[in-house]
Amino acid sequence: MSEPSSAYINDIGGDVKGIIGDGDVKGIIGDIKGGVVNQYIIAQHSEAEIHSRNLKPGSPYLSLNKFEPGDKDKFFGREKWIIKLSNDLKNNNLLLLLGASGSGKSSLVQAGLIPYLSDQWGTSQLVTIIFVPDNNPFTSFSENFPKNIRIKRLIFLIRQII
């Protein structure tokens, strides 16, 4: 993108203090005829040019779909929350995560917390049960409980929670 021309700077008048920014976004800062100007010039690209660009492979945008454990490399920017949830779980043995519908709770747990805990504790220490509760959440839970977990292990886990 070219610099604003000196004719343009003369047209706005006043004392132009400088040009800021680089690339496609530039700005002019200065006093203009008794006022202050903060003007940005933003380059525009044609719709055809934008549509001709290829998407990068592995785009992290999943639309309205939730992130799952296999998407952990695409799920970023929530490290603070993942560590906080991990610490809460470590201190309390139980984690209750509440939030508005569509706010990213499932994605945070499945693509953030579960992979983080697997890396920290190892998969042998982690029992992952993912289910969508229906009218009876306890029935949903029991129907989705892994069949390969022994009853003694289940009793041990429940006692740790209580």
Image: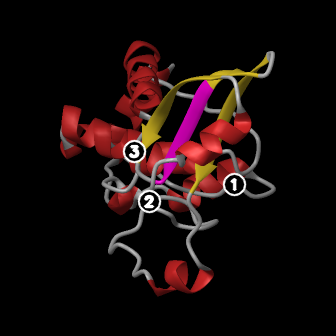
Q: Nearer the viewer, mark 3 or mark 1?
A: 3
Sooner in the amino-acid sequence: mark 3 or mark 1: 3
Q: Which residue is mark 1?
A: 133
Q: Which residue is tagged 3? A: 76
Chief secondary structure of the magenta span?
Answer: strand
Query: Residue 159: in sight, yes or no?
Result: no
Q: CA distance from mark 3 to mark 1?
A: 27 Å
Q: Tag 2's secondary structure?
A: loop
Residue 109 horizontal side relative to residue 124, left or right: right
- Could you tell me residue 98's position as x and y percent? 68, 33
As measured in the structure, the alpha-carbon distance from the residue carrying label 2 to the one carrying label 1 is 17 Å
- Dot 3 lies on which element? loop
Q: Where does the magenta region start and end?
A: 24-29
Q: Amino acid at mark 3?
A: Phe
Query: 40 above or below 74?
Result: above
Instruction: Residue 27: say if magenta.
Output: yes
Q: Secondary structure at mark 1?
A: loop
